[in-house]
Amino acid sequence: MCLSHINRLFGLSLLTLMLASCATTSGDRDEHGDMGSGDNGAEIDAGVVNDPLKGGLWNKKLWEGAPKPYVDGLKAAQRGQSNAAMKLFRKSMFDFPDFAPAYTNLGLQQLKLNDLTAAKESLNKSLKIAPNDAVVYNHLGVIARMNGKFDTALKHYKKAIELKSDYANAHLNIGVLLDLYLYELKSALKHYEIYQSIISKKDATVTKWIVEIKRRIAKGKK
């Protein structure tokens, strides 16, 4: 399977794993809008797209053309070994410079380590190869939000949702942005509710936020 075909498959079919530190939205948002510790106020995907480790004929067939260092990098990332993972992703990038997922996953590990400049650079390189990757746009939104560029963050989240309408984390992230930073409560409520409708089990914390935001909207009408 050629790399260009794999890149297209990554753009069309997204199956992401959550980082252990932000698998849920447990924890209250502080005055900066951060949710719990370690997640920087937004849901960050591990970037393991079409995870080959889950087995199954479909996944096995999909991954026949993936570079071995890249797959090994995913395994290292799942074990929480960010430095080892980044080394393997860079090896994949050197050997296969047009393999977009390596740039994406390098960027997500850099974001996990709070290296925003490097993460943004890696994600933008991925977009040049595969310009329709919702995961990349979502995380560029996270970086923009962390840098205080809220309008840019909004643009990126909207693009992620345009590319993948059922992308739960993008709906959650845009909801937090609209709620706590842009004060567009009705729009924030809409995205919180969409998020809850997409995930398999409703998030108790987000349910509380929905109750709170409805109260704030009602209070504003008085």
Image (tube, rainbow, N blue to C red):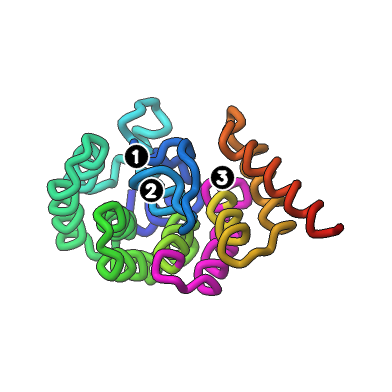
Helix, strand or loop at label 2? It is loop
Q: Is residue 208 left or right of residue 47?
A: right
Q: Residue at x 55, y 74 (%)?
A: 151
Q: Which residues are magenta?
A: 145-170
- Please give the residue where the numbered disc 3 appears in the rendered image: 168
Tell me if label 3 and label 1 are in contact, CB under 8 Å: no
Disc 3 from disc 1: Cα separation: 17 Å
72 vs 106: above or below: above
Q: Give the amino acid type for the residue marked by disc 1 in the picture.
A: Ser
Disc 2 from disc 1: Cα separation: 7 Å
Helix, strand or loop at label 3? It is helix
- Please give the residue where the numbered disc 1 appears in the rendered image: 21
Q: Is residue 176 left or right of residue 215?
A: left
**Residue 180: image location, x then y, percent:** 57, 59
**Residue 86: image location, x then y, percent:** 18, 53
Circle 2 residues within 10 Å: few <14, some 14–19, many ≥20: some
**Residue 15: image location, x then y, percent:** 45, 40
Tell me if label 2 and label 1 are in contact, CB under 8 Å: yes
> Who comes first in sequence, dot 2 or dot 1?
1
- Please give the residue where the numbered disc 2 appears in the rendered image: 39
Circle 3 residues within 10 Å: few <14, some 14–19, many ≥20: some
User: Which sits in the foreground, 69 or 141?
Assistant: 141
**Residue 4: image location, x then y, percent:** 37, 59
Majority secondary structure of the magenta segment?
helix
Q: Residue at x 49, y 48 (%)?
A: 29
Disc 2 from disc 3: Cα separation: 16 Å
Tell me if label 2 and label 3 are in contact, CB under 8 Å: no
Q: Give the amino acid type for the residue marked by disc 3 in the picture.
A: Ala
Asked whether residue 161 is drawn in magenta, I would say yes
Q: Residue at x 19, y 47 (%)?
A: 82
